[in-house]
Amino acid sequence: MVTIGKKDLASTATSAGRPLLRICIDTLCGCSIDSTEYLEPTSYSRLSAPVEYYIDTHNDISLHAWTFTFGTGEDNGIWMNSGDQAGSIMATLVWLLMTYSAVTVTLLTVTKGFPPVLGMVYTFLCSMALACHAKTSLTDPGSVPRAAVPMEEQRRENPSHSMCGQCQTFKPPMSHHCRICNRCVSRMDHHCPWVSVGRYVAIHFSSRWHILFLNTLFVICYPVGCR
Amino acid sequence: MNNCVGAANLKHFILFLIYTWTCAAYSLVLFGWNYFFCASEGCTFHVVVIHLVRAMTFLCIGAFLFTSSMLMNVTYGLMTGIGTIDRLKKKATNTMGQSDEEPIALKDVFGIGGVHTWPFPVDPLFDNYEKIMGYSTPQRLLREQQFMEQTSLNEVLGQGQKGGVV
């Protein structure tokens, strides 16, 4: 079938035992949801629709909408870093500070300090920023799966390819291994919380000006809620 | 953020930076205008709120500076194709001159879904997913092959039906 990986995963899940949540749902509604009807959907409407480009539905969680796992592994449904405590605190702080600023501006409009329209604009911008924050945190940044192989082009151009020592997979050009996610990430820019600060400090240690300016800026501004 | 920033979520990261930057700049302009240019009675804030505003001004200055520097980093990355980690590595080893990266096109970050999808944090749709990610998988190749076969089969069937009617 079209979704090979998912089907395998689903069949192993049903053979190992029914997920707890589904048992709960079954007992609640007093009925038994037969899992096989979800394993064999009659048609893949998104795939059979005539589209010009290829849509990847491999990682959709449409088959088991009520069960989910989170983490940064390949088998996890929802991408989320939960092991890094400093990063989690930072992310929560961003939400708290953004909410604080939105509440302040709202109070200003309530106490007639500003016209309400300006407050509306601010809260809109604020909510958009928070939505983007959540989306960035919960989106797979382009992790390289175990089954990754070089593309045709790369194979033609280059007879030898680099591998990642930690992942034991093919390492695409421009990708890096992230120690916090424990995955290789395609075209990785940086990991957001404290790791990048550590790197900054380590790499710029020779430059006094950077120490004085950039790192001070980082240390001051990091908790301020920019990420 | 507590996550890596890579090819697939660079769009959301840039959007987050832009929105936060706009937030900070907007509130600084509001407060600054109120502080410097508005002297009438109606412009004085409430006694309690004025403390909140003071704290928020500091936050906004910090956020503004930080997001500005991050936006510059990201813009540099887009214009040269060298990510933040790569840039620092190259600087540390003095190999900046040997880089052969190419600039990243905006449609490789924001997708080909149209400009109206750019300001919203929805997943970008890439025209060549493999090329952007830099790898392929046997499953992907197989699924693509099946998809192509299915579409060609549908076309053949459609033509057959048409022929039958005629």
Image (tube, rainbow, N blue to C red):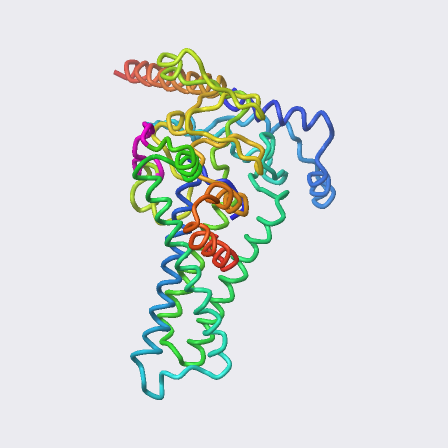
Asked whether residue A210 is drawn in magenta, I would say: no
x and y percentages locating residue A208 in the rendered image: 44, 49
Check the image and report above or below for A107 versus A200.
below
In the image, taking residue A134 as reference, residue B29 lies left or right, namely left
x and y percentages locating residue A108 in the rendered image: 44, 76
Residue lying at 32% horizontally and 74% vertically, measured from the top left:
B33
x and y percentages locating residue A174 in the rendered image: 42, 29
In the image, taking residue A183 as reference, residue A111 lies left or right, namely left
Check the image and report above or below for A77 versus A135.
above
Work out whether residue A1 or residue B163 is closer to the camera in this orientation and state it: A1
Total labels drawn: 0
Which of the image's four quarters has the C terminus of chain B?
A: top left
> Which quadrant would residue B85 be assigned to in this image?
top left
> Which quadrant would residue A15 be assigned to in this image?
top right
In magenta, the rendered stretch is B97-110
x and y percentages locating residue B120 in the rendered image: 38, 49
